[in-house]
Image (tube, helix red, strand yellow):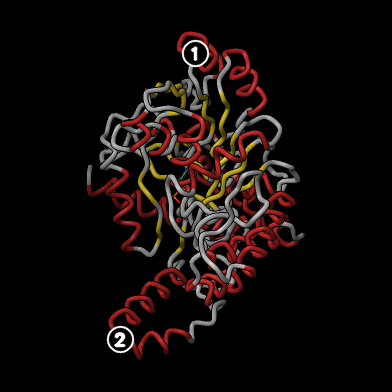
Amino acid sequence: MLTKDNKDTSKYNVNNIEEIKKASPKVAGLIAKEYERQLNNIELIASENYCSEAVLAACGSCLSWKYAEGYPYNRTSGNLGRYYGGTEFVDELEEYCCDQWRKVFNTDYHVNVQPHSGSQANFSAYAALLEPGDTVLSMSLDNGGHLTHGSSVNFSGKLYDIHFYDVNEDGIIDMPMVREKARELKPKLILAGASAYARVLDFQEFANIAKEVGAYFMVDMAHIAGLIAAGEHNSPFGYADVITTTTHKTLRGPRGGLIFAKPELAKKIDSKVFPYAQGGPLEHIIAGKAICAEEAQTEEYKQYIKQVVKNSKAFAKAFLDLGYKVVTGGTDNHLFMVDLREKKFSGRILQERLDENQITLNKNCVPGDPRSPKETSGIRVGTAPMTTRGYVESDFVKVAQKIDEIIKELDQEFA
Ligand code: PLP
């Protein structure tokens, strides 16, 4: 088995489990089991990571008790400040957090660190830029976009008039199609960013197209934010009007969202986070986000992200060498998808069989997928979590070989 090895599986101080046990043995037992699962399994979910113990501690700190609706005074002109007393320390913390994020991305954009999640960041960003019914051009879920990029089951698909651009036959975003559709539709907003796209995004070209048709340009960098922070992917700052992200994927921080905006959009963005979409900010998570931002500026983090990308390329090559089809033929970032359209079993069946073998990943539609999103004809893998655990290229080659063995078993079963 590949599951137990010499990689770092004893990183966190879990003594607090003892406290939880006193209050609820049931909850403590489930947390302990999940902790074991996370450390013993090979975790390949591209949107997950293991944050530092410092981030974890901040997220469990007394800041969780504090109400602080509103924003620190003097943040934007006309800002009414906080709606509660006793906020002097959380005010300082929130300003510090914003400053640190500006440093991470070397930008003077306005920052809002209050969104509780990536989806809520997108909700507020759209609300700041659009009216219901406005036209948006984005990437569809089946081509690698996110639910909040206009899926019909999501608020985005229900509130706005969403149109999609596609990938070409090589799985690469079809930029001529983006331009053509933008000229035809004259959208109010063009969105770049994805959950399952392995290649570099051409922010400059997207921005040119948006300018040409008079649209806002927004980037959802949730997946690649860590790569951008470390200089391993080009930056959308300077090109996009608004940039959203999560902090828990390649950024390796707490679960949560951030919004960056050109300074002239600051007031609109802030008012669409609070009071429009949210109440009290999660100051304990904001503390975790501040620590995450400090960590993202270290040399250790830059080396980590370099290794994430090297591992991803080696992992994709291992699948190619084993005869598999990788969507786009490889990867430039931390993730890629293996195309299983020719198989007699679905991505769901493989995901479940891998779970039984302590390998965690997710089924994923591939471009042109004939199967439903519940079944899918692909798997998505990412290297960020296992790189945090110390995996290098040769470890990922072994994981690809193990997945290949399991696929061969399924080939026989479904022959
Ligand atoms: N945007 C993108 C590109 C994502 O991949 C995700 C989550 O996977 C989100 C937004 C939403 O983040 P959250 O799960 O925090 O709502």
* Some atom of ligand 1 lies within 8 Å of the CB belonging to the residue at label 2: no
Q: Find out if the beta carbon at label 1 lies less than 8 Å from the nearest ligand 1 atom.
A: no
Give the position of the C terminus as an image quadrant: top left
Q: Secondary structure at mark 1?
A: loop
- Residue 250 place in picture, x, y as percent: 58, 53
Quarter residue 347 falls in: top left
Q: Is residue 73 left or right of residue 406?
A: right
Report the residue marked by disc 2: 25
Q: Which mark, by number, is residue 186?
A: 1
Disc number lying in front (1 or 2):
1
Residue 12 visible within the image: yes
Q: Quadrant of residue 90?
A: bottom right
Point out residue 177 in the picture as x, y percentages from the top left corner: 50, 14
- The spot of residue 165 in percent (x, y) is 45, 21
Question: Which is nearer the eye, 259 or 239?
Answer: 259
Q: Is residue 96 above or below residue 340?
A: below
Image x and y of residue 218, in percent: 56, 32
Q: Nearer the viewer, residue 265 or 301?
A: 265
Q: Which mark is residue 31?
A: none
In the image: residue 237, left or right of residue 16:
right
Disc 1 versus disc 2: distance between alpha carbons?
A: 57 Å
